[in-house]
């Protein structure tokens, strides 16, 4: 029995021996790093681009804020739209790039909650949307309009961002 107590006491003693208190000196600072050689920097002129522009031309069949007549023509021939038909996931084409938009019926301010994924420019700030007549209005998180669209086909909406970039939604 005493042997068991002696073994237990020895085990506790050994385990506590490994737990030494280490005091750190607040005045300790590591030695300074040695400076490393830096290669010299070279500069030269970039070669000219192959064409006039490396970006494709913007599509001409979508209305833009820069072309009010085209916007009015699309608005006049726009199909009726309901909030319920807008709910869900949409593929977005915006100025030559594409991303995703998600629209819900959850109230947010005067509109409904919405958002984007993988978008660039103004669409990254999208927070809500609403239907006004035949027009779908996209708003940023502050409630300012960042785009507007009209239904041009069963699963397609065309319009533009507030800065005039062509904008299309499709499923």
Image: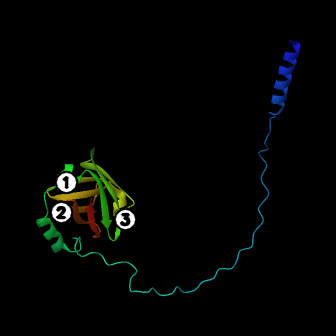
Counting from the top left corner in percent of width and height, residue 67 is at 20, 74
- Labels 1 and 3: the sequence-earlier one: 3
Counting from the top left corner in percent of width and height, residue 65 is at 23, 70
Counting from the top left corner in percent of width and height, residue 120 is at 38, 64
Viewer-proximal residue, 97 or 143? Answer: 97
Q: Secondary structure at mark 2?
A: strand
Viewer-proximal residue, 78 or 171? Answer: 171
Q: Secondary structure at mark 3?
A: helix
- Labels 1 and 2: the sequence-earlier one: 1
What is the quadrant of residue 75 in the picture?
A: bottom left
Counting from the top left corner in percent of width and height, residue 161 is at 28, 65
What is the quadrant of residue 155 in the picture?
A: bottom left
Q: Secondary structure at mark 1?
A: strand
Residue placed furthest toward the left: 76
**Crowd rating for badge 3 (residues with CA inside 10 Å; few <14, some 14–19, many 20+):** few
What is the quadrant of residue 151 in the picture?
A: bottom left
Q: Residue at x 34, y 63 (%)?
A: 122
Q: Is 170 situated left or right of 32 in this image? A: left
Name the disc covering residue 153, or none.
2
- Give the CA distance from mark 1 to mark 2: 16 Å
- Labels 2 and 3: the sequence-earlier one: 3
Name the disc covering residue 108, or none.
none
Q: Which residue is mark 3?
A: 121
- Give the CA distance from mark 1 to mark 3: 22 Å
Q: Which residue is mark 1?
A: 131
Q: Is 29 situated left or right of 80 in this image? A: right
């Amino acid at each position: 029995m005493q042997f068991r107590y002696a073994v237990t006491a020895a085990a506790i003693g050994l385990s506590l021996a490994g737990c030494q208190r280490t005091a750190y000196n607040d005045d300790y600072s590591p030695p300074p790093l040695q400076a490393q050689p830096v290669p010299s920097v070279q500069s030269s002129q970039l070669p000219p681009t192959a064409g006039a522009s490396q970006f494709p031309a913007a599509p001409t069949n979508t209305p833009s804020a820069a072309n009010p007549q085209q916007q009015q023509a699309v608005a006049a021939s726009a199909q009726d739209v309901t909030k319920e038909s807008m709910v869900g996931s949409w593929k977005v084409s915006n100025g030559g790039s594409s991303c995703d938009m998600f629209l819900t019926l959850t109230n947010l301010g005067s509109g409904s909650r919405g958002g984007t994924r993988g978008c660039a420019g103004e669409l990254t700030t999208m927070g809500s949307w609403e239907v006004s007549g035949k027009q779908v209005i996209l708003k940023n998180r502050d409630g300012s309009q960042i785009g507007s669209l009209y239904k041009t086909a069963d699963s397609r909406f065309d319009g533009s961002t507030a800065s005039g970039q062509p904008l299309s939604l499709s499923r």
